[in-house]
Amino acid sequence: MLRSLNENPEKGFLGGEGFIYPRGVGLIQYWRSFEDLERFARNPADAHLKAWQRFNQGIGADGSVGIWHETYLIEPGKYKAIYGNMPVFGLAAATKHVPAMGRKETVRRPLGGDGEPAVSSPAIQPPN
């Protein structure tokens, strides 16, 4: 599924992260729009829908495998993700990564407000 989505960016998939957590394996996905996600999920010509149907018929509700779906709609320009001492990851990897320094490190500014950081950013030394 991910290979197909990465090879077909017109479907609207922006990126994703796989991870292992105490209850099993997870996958976070980022999409250009909810409409793109839904079109992908419901497209009978796409292998995803057939695989999902086989899963439901084979596993169904027997309790052996759990599915966790959450969907969040984010208004363009009204989101911010801050990472401290992290590589480009998550939403930053799927969109544009901009260092949050000075006035950019406050969440209020990209959400339409004004404000100064509560704690100043440490000075970053240029590499030698």
Image (cartoon, rainbow, N blue to C red):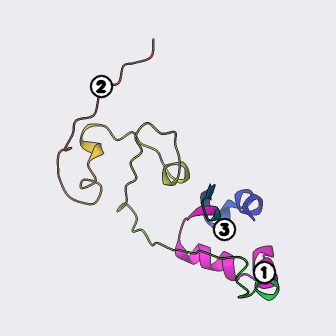
Residue 32 at x, y = what percent?
54, 65
* Residue 9 vs residue 46, the one in the foreground: 46
Q: CA distance from mark 2 to mark 1?
A: 52 Å
* Nearest to viewer (mark 2 / mark 1): 1
Q: Which residues are magenta?
A: 26-55
Q: Whole-percent x and y of residue 22?
A: 60, 60
Quarter containing the N terminus: bottom right
Q: Label 1 is placed on what type of residue?
A: Phe
| Residue 69: x %, y % from top left | 57, 75
> Could you tell whether 98 is left or right of 30 in the image?
left
Residue 18 seen in this snapshot: no
Q: Is residue 48 magenta?
A: yes
| Mark linked to residue 123 | 2
In this view, 125 is above or below 2: above
Q: Decide: few, some or many residues near mark 3? Use Cα within 10 Å; few <14, some 14-19, many ≥20.
A: some
Q: Residue drawn 45% across and 16% down?
A: 127
Of the residues under marks 2 and 1, which one precedes in the sequence?
1
Q: Quadrant of residue 8?
A: bottom right
Which image quarter is the C terminus in? top left
- Residue at x 52% of width, y 42% of height: 88
The residue wearing badge 1 is 55
> Where is mark 3, residue-wise?
11
Q: Secondary structure at mark 1?
A: helix
